[in-house]
Amino acid sequence: MEKIGFFGAGRMAEGILSAIEDRKGVFMAEKNPARAEEIAKRYGVRVTGDLKAVARECDLVFLAVRPQDVDAVAAEVAGAFAAGCALASIVAGKTLAKLRAAFGRRVRLVRVMPNLALRAKAGMCAICAAPSTPRAAVDAVARILGRAGETVVLKERDFDAVTALSGSGPAYFAYMEAAMAEGGVALGLKPDVARLLAGQTMYGTAKFLRESGMELQPFIDGVCTKGGTTAAGMKFLAAPQFKKIVARTLAAAARRSAELA
């Protein structure tokens, strides 16, 4: 697939766009003139307010609009898609069945659950596809998103869990960082210093674990020297209630994802 299009040029769409190395064939549709001009200048891509023009010309189109705007977009581009065009939706809560009802049977559908880290080229994107969508279309989506982080191809039935874990996860991760920073302030550190220490510690730990491939429990055990400071803290953190709270947090998010679908 050579010509890549976008319906919408919001922050998530920009995150995907920034990961595309060769942007000569990129064509974006954005209704907001100021945003369209901003994206065109920043990335040197064509931007139009005409959704149909993008649908007619592109082999793969990323649907990156608000959930409440999907039906209006579908109505506007009805019958305009190029033959064999694939539509990759990053819209939260829109199942393949809903997308099929909106866009019809002609378009090849791929559904993506991204997260905000996509904008830092460290995203986590889960991908699923309609049964009629060829593997080549799925591979093309994975290849593009893979330049902005990690991807995994799953069944759609897994998407509520994915939404809870990696989709909503950045907020939970940031909440933990905030709690650590606040704890540092309570111990007498200045707020900016506490935030730096908490943030860099979380970043560095995640980076080391990813790059080393080390299992989590051996890493924890290695830091927790018997009788040391980490072990003293882990007595509180390792209480059963903490893992139960995390599990209940994810379960609540997954239930809500199912309700919205």
Image (spheres, helix red, strand yellow):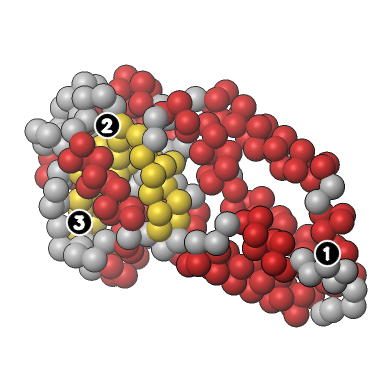
Q: Is residue 12 above or below residue 121?
A: above
Which residue type carries mark 2?
A: Leu
Tell me the mark number nearer the camera, choosing from 1 and 2. 1
Which residue is denoted by mark 3 in the rendering? 26
Task: Say which element carries label 3.
Answer: strand
Which residue type carries mark 3?
A: Val
Q: Tell me where residue 192 appears, x and y as whole percent.
A: 74, 78
Which residue is denoted by mark 1 in the rendering? 231
Q: Tell me where residue 261 appears, x and y as whole percent.
A: 49, 25
Does the CB distance between marks 1 and 3 fall below 8 Å?
Answer: no
Q: Tell me where residue 133 appears, x and y as whole percent.
A: 22, 30
131 left or right of 164 in image: left
Q: Tell me where residue 112 appears, x and y as whole percent.
A: 38, 40
Using the rendered image of the protein, determine whether residue 143 is visible from the camera's viewpoint.
Answer: yes
Q: Is residue 148 above or below residue 192?
A: above
Q: Is residue 213 above or below residue 197?
A: above
Q: Closer to the N terminus: mark 2 or mark 3?
A: 3
Q: Which mark is residue 109?
A: 2
Q: Which mark is residue 123?
A: none
Distance Cα–Cα, label 1 vs label 3: 53 Å
Q: Residues within 10 Å of mark 1 (few under 14, many from 20)?
A: some
